[in-house]
Image (cartoon, coloured by chain):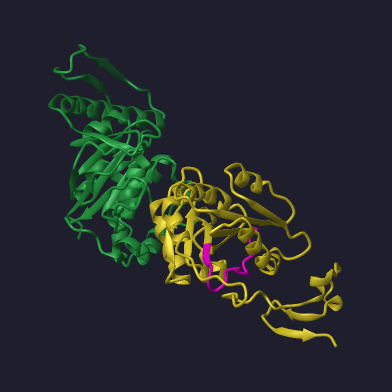
């Protein structure tokens, strides 16, 4: 089965780009299942179901949405297998800049908004730098020069990636993206590993502390000056 | 160096073959692309962008310099073939014109001295002068568009420029096209603006996802275009007079025939 993991910041256009890409994949008679993850609320799964694609919805609620996606990946694969799909597409919740949910044999697709400013590629970290394909959205409303600068910055962070200039409104780039989707192969839950570790700071905030004063916090903590320490027993 | 781009026929939305064999577009040529919404204009441009090899929904093939382009040319993001200019584009970077052009020229490994030339040529296309210390985000529509055109002409490496609906830009459109084609770009103009469409030597007519025909601009159209150009120039002057807060004095005399010159003169 082909497994494609689509990640990006909130509002970058993941769902819009995916909907156009799915149309091309459906024309190629692909059997697809989708797993859509969000934090608190979404109705995107209805949009996928409307075009006839079996969609599994997961809301991460109190759990970090990236960890939730990774933790539940094998269940998503089972869902796709039950549907006899030959492709599973996982659309993650808008990610923070620290995680990357791609596994070794999935196709990692990063959707990034060109209007977020020329420094964004330098800020977003592993979900850009470990992606196979980077889809740049909203490039049609900024200047050619800014598009070129943005592209260059992406290549600085991820020299080997393929770049697609996509448009969630018109569907530009979707046919090309659909071709890449079919290239992913060899996914195996038993042996699959993340390309980049999830953040390993475990602190009292992770387990529900709400007070802000430093005295109340324990665990692996990092200070403004960059010093990393372990506080606790 | 891209000397020519050739489009080899594919199929329309119904799967029927297109009514042409191939179109060769040479360096410095300006070609129009016309047709209603949904007729396939964007798909045609995408085929050129992706250097399609019968692997897009249209099944067209694109040749560069008469040959199938190498893989690297297709997939290397640094070698993107098509630069775009459209009405909807804005500068969003919060920096001065000078800083911005320097950043772009560094990205493209260009000589930083080029930026003087970019600003100078941009100022030939707009009525309001652009200064290098101005912030990008305060530029007017006309100034922005002029700067974008000059920037594409000198700093972008892309050999093809796509101009998409740039009707009301407040810039000298004719001169903008001449600037781009003069520096060896292949210019594709997707437009229904009569001045721009008739300025091209030929136009590709799209219908139902396919190329319906290729139309050579007629002598009569060229003559009309000359007159539209002159009217456009006069309109540009009037716009500047309004902007400067001056009283506009102009008269408009025309006997209705295309063979005679249009008498529309702005008095300064």
Between A198 and B154, which is closer to the camera in this rendering? A198
Residue drawn at point x = 65 percent, y = 74 percent: A198
Which chain can be seen in green? Answer: B
Q: Is residue B267 magenta?
A: no
Q: Position of residue A222 (x, y in %)?
A: 71, 79
Residue drawn at point x = 39 percent, y = 42 percent: B86
In the image, residue B103 above or below residue B199: below
Task: Assign the N terminus of chain B to one quadrant of the image.
Answer: bottom left
Q: Position of residue A94 (x, y in %)?
A: 63, 58
* Quadrant hosting residue B30: top left
**Is any part of residue A106 visible from this angle?**
yes
Highlighted magenta segment, given as a residue range: A91-109
Task: Assign the C terminus of chain B to one quadrant of the image.
Answer: top left
Residue drawn at point x = 21 percent, y = 28 percent: B225
Residue B223 falls left or right of residue A28 = left
Between A29 and B76, which is closer to the camera in this rendering? A29
Q: Position of residue B146 (x, y in %)?
A: 34, 45
Predominant SS along the magenta part? loop
Q: Is residue A98 magenta?
A: yes
**Is any part of residue B166 visible from this angle?**
no
Between B9 and B185, which is closer to the camera in this rendering? B9
Q: Position of residue A109 (x, y in %)?
A: 52, 62
Between B234 and A47, which is closer to the camera in this rendering? A47
Number of numbered tags placed on the structure image: 0
Which chain can be seen in yellow? Answer: A
């Amino acid at each position: 089965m082909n497994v494609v993991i689509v990640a990006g910041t909130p509002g970058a256009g993941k769902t819009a780009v995916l909907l156009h890409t799915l149309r091309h994949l459906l024309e190629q008679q692909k059997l697809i299942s989708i797993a859509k993850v969000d934090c608190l609320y979404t109705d995107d799964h209805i949009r996928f179901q409307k075009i006839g694609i079996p969609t599994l919805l997961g809301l991460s609620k109190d759990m970090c949405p990236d960890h939730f996606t990774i933790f539940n990946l094998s269940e998503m694969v089972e869902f796709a297998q039950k549907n006899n799909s030959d492709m599973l597409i996982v659309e993650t919740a808008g990610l923070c800049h620290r995680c990357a949910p791609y596994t070794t044999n999935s196709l990692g697709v990063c959707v990034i908004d060109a209007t977020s400013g020329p420094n964004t590629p330098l800020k977003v970290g592993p979900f850009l730098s470990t992606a196979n394909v980077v889809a740049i959205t909203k490039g049609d409303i900024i200047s050619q020069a800014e598009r070129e600068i943005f592209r260059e910055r992406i290549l600085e962070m991820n020299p080997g990636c393929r770049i697609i200039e996509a448009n969630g409104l018109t569907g530009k780039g979707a046919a090309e993206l659909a071709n890449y989707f079919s290239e992913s192969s060899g996914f195996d839950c038993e042996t699959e590993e993340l390309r980049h570790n999830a953040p390993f700071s475990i602190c009292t905030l992770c387990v529900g502390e709400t007070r802000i004063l430093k005295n109340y916090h324990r665990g692996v903590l990092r200070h403004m000056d960059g010093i990393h320490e372990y506080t606790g027993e | 160096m891209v000397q020519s781009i050739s489009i080899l026929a594919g199929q329309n939305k119904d799967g029927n073959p297109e009514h042409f064999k191939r179109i060769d577009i040479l360096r410095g040529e300006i070609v129009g692309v016309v047709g209603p919404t949904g007729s396939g204009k964007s798909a045609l441009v995408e085929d050129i962008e992706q250097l399609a090899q019968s692997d897009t929904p249209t099944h067209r093939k694109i040749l560069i310099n008469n040959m199938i382009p190498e893989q690297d040319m297709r997939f290397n993001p640094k070698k993107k073939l098509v630069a775009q200019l459209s009405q909807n584009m804005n500068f969003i970077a919060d920096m001065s014109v000078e800083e911005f052009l320097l950043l772009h020229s560094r990205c493209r490994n260009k000589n930083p001295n080029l930026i003087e030339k970019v600003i100078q040529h941009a100022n030939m296309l707009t009525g309001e002068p652009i200064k290098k210390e101005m912030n990008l985000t305060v530029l007017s529509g006309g100034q922005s568009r002029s700067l974008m055109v000059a920037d594409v002409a000198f700093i972008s490496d892309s050999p093809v420029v796509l101009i998409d609906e740039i009707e009301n830009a407040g810039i000298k459109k004719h001169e903008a096209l001449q600037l781009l084609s003069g520096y060896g770009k292949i210019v594709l103009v997707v437009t229904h603006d009569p001045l721009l469409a008739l300025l091209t030597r030929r136009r590709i007519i799209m219908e139902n996802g396919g190329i319906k025909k290729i139309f050579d601009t007629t002598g009569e159209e060229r003559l009309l275009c000359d007159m539209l150009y002159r009217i456009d120039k006069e309109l540009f002057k009037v716009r500047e007079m309004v902007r400067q807060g001056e009283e506009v004095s102009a008269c408009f005399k025309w006997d209705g025939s295309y063979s005679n010159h249009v008498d529309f003169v702005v008095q300064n």
